[in-house]
Image (cartoon, rainbow, N blue to C red):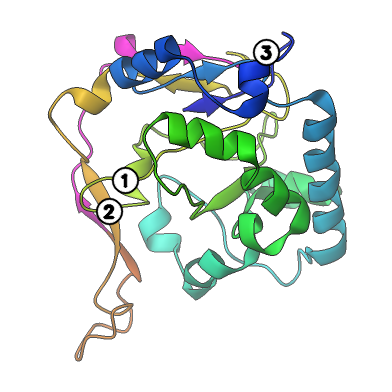
Amino acid sequence: AALGRGRHARSAAMAAGALSDEQVAAFRRDGVLVLEGFSSAEEVEALKARMLQIVEDDFDPAAVRSVFSTDEQTRKSDDYFLDSAARVSFFLEEGEEAQAAVDKTMRLNKVGHALHDLDSTFRAFSRSERVAGVCRSLGFVRPTPVQSMYIFKHPRVGGEVNCHQDSTFLATDPPSCCGLWWAVEDADEGNGCLWAIKGSHADGSGVHRKFVRGARARGEPGADPDSPLMEMDGELPEYEVSKFELKGA
């Protein structure tokens, strides 16, 4: 689900987090739902300001070497990446141009993956009653955030984010995770909005790939010490580009 900041006033129901029957039905049918006006301008600015402070105080470009790449994530995943599940970690953007930038934020692809637990501002936002209300509307009994990321979408630098399913990276059996995405700036076709294939969650194909720990990460005896820590289990299908629809926010 994409939860974005729009220009419309929030309704009383949205302030409480509850979705309407029509919105729930649309999400069940399409697998994606855009909620304009979910967050106030003040809330969004507070998140942006807090992230700038985190980068200024805690990010040392000389000390970080972990690059985030959706195309080469298996090869580039390292212990720093694995440990980030319980930390606030910094992941560099691909490309020499990004790493030569004077502005530290321009060097970053994202910050994650435990902001919802370890930072008071992001924890309050992620665990707010309104966010929980959305999840409860979708049938979650005890909604709990398990991963959080602040992703930088810098113009003219960085790598491509290819087609994927979130359940590839947050795999449970049966699937039990729902992605929520906030646009901290107005997002459209020109600056990095979401695209989705409506109904693809219900086409019977399930989760195409799972991002799993390899033999070395699992500590198996005799594992190749040079083998990747993470592996992709499964194959990415050929998506029909014409089926993708714009999901700006």
Q: Is residue 191 magenta?
A: no
- The residue located at (51%, 23%) in the rendering is 194
Badge 3 element:
loop
Which mark is on residue 176? Answer: 1
Res 89 quadrant in image: bottom right
Furthest toward the left, the residue is: 204
Which residue is the site of mark 3?
A: 11
Pick whichever, 44 or 192, lies toward us: 44
Badge 2 element:
loop
Which residue is the site of mark 2?
A: 172
Amino acid type at circle 1 is Ser
Label 2 close to label 1 by CB (< 8 Å)? yes
Q: Is residue 238 magenta?
A: yes
Q: Counting residues from the N terminus, which is met first, the one under dot 3 or under dot 2?
A: 3
Residue 36 seen in the current view: yes
Q: Count residues near mark 2 (Cα–Cα under 10 Å), then give few for <14, some for 14-19, many for 20+.
A: few
Amino acid type at circle 2 is Thr
